[in-house]
Image (spheres, rainbow, N blue to C red):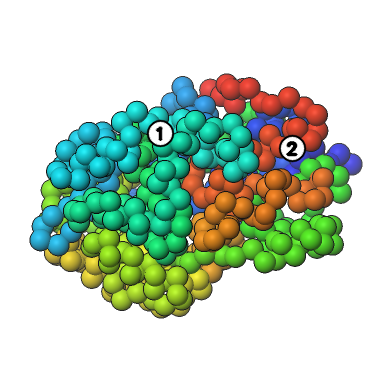
Amino acid sequence: MAADPDVTVVGAGPNGLVAALTLAAAGLSVQVVEKSDTPGGGVRTVALTLPGYRHDVCSTIHPLAAASPFMRDFLDGRTDVELAHPAIPLAHPLDGGRAAVLHSDLHQTAAELHADGARWRQVFGPRTDWVRLSSALLRPISQTALHHSFELGRFGLFAGMPSTVLARLFRSDEARALLGGSAAHSLVPLNRPLTASFALLLNGLGQSVGWPAIRGGSGLLIDAMVHTLTELGGTIECGRAVRSTSDLPGTGLLIFDLTPRQVARIMGDDLPRRTRRQFQRFRYGPGVFKVDYALSEPVPWIHEACRQAGTLHVGGTFDEIALSEAEVGAGRVPERPFVIAAQTSVFDRSRVEGSGETFWAYCHVPNGSTVDMLDRIESQIERFAPGFTDVVLDRHIAGPAWFEDYNESYVGGDIGGGSYGGLQLLARPRLTTDPYGTGNPRVLLCSASTPPGAGVHGMGGYLAAADALKRLGLPPVEAGRLRRSPS
């Protein structure tokens, strides 16, 4: 009878795979089990619409991957995973044929903001190293505060503000729109404290490392991780659901790439009572309603910069975005939703065969919403790109129920691993100095419900693995040990 592995990772999303990679590189025997037929979680590329069109089911644009210490190390020197950059990271169309544009250079962005340019440079700091700063922020708050106080100095001046307060520093619709659109990635009403941190980090990264996508589809990153894990001796078993402790090995570490409530259900009384209660109280955030498109030609945006951008924030002025997010936060469906869109084939022609285009757009909705948002999303796009629906060849529509069926961790359509409102932004998954631990020395958590939260950065998995190695009395994995020649 085969011995139990040293480590079993439940869930083959990017954090689960990163945890498995890190521990396999340390010489441990590692098994990953995944309920779905393929690994990847929110990082899969599939044919959702017409033949020849490749769509990322969830995550597409990866500024955090470009800045993450783990991902930068993992991707260094690889030829099977390439970050593709659009000419313009982000454009935000406004009425009257205008647009706010986030360039990959701080000074170019500021120059186009005219009277707000000097203040923009002040807030985003020409001397700020956003990669170094993101390395500090992509960690638990205890590690950030203790070891990265210098990097946090300028950032902290503005990051704790509600976005509605930070926006008062600017006069133009353009500057305020760039702040509001990026802040809305928090899925929290913009009048809440700390929402400005999302605007600062995402715009800061856009002006330094860009907002890239993975050439050929995000799923190629998962393929590379799986290949490397196999080289390191790890195994992956797909199509295997874990419902209780009886589905798990009797010995070895258990690391869950799941949300806390799911872990509480699986582990039951094997978790300390206090931890189990904290996990059961974990709050989920809003859901999403997403539409993937196969287009006959590019989106006919009025403003030229929008035609060159990889990501579009479609929602009008800062005040309109704030109203939309406030409605979602109050449990209501917005009539004019804030829409986040990506047009990957504009800068990555490998996404589509022939002359067509791939495009997706989604908006935030209350958790578990059953309202069809298609017409409202397309009305917002048509507002800034008249004739958009004329170039649509096919659509794939995915509401909250679809996303939860696709990935059980997307509870109620929450693709962010839990709410970022209130204390949960800083204390994920619970208030503790041990965010990856559970009180059971055998059980750890590594999902987007742990620090630093959602995004394809792999740091939740890497830091949980580092915690596991420390518990086992093993040295950390050195830089470069995860690099293997691609197949």
Q: Are marks 2 and 1 in contact (CB under 8 Å)?
A: no
Position of 406 with respect to 428 (left or right) is left
Name the secondary structure under disc 1. helix
Res. 344 visible in picture = yes
Residue topped by disc 2: 468
Where on the picture, by quarter, is residue 107?
Answer: top left
Q: Of residues 242 and 46, which is closer to you in this image?
A: 242
Toward the right, the furthest residue is 1
Name the secondary structure under disc 2. helix
Q: Nearer the viewer, mark 2 or mark 1?
A: 1
Image mark for residue 199: none
Res. 360 visible in picture = no
Horizontal and vertical percent for residue 116?
20, 45
Residue topped by disc 1: 130
Label 2 vs 1, first from the N-terminus: 1
Mark 1 neighbour density, 10 Å: few (under 14) some (14–19) many (20 or more):
many
The amino acid marked with disc number 1 is: Trp
Where on the picture, by quarter, is residue 26?
Answer: top right
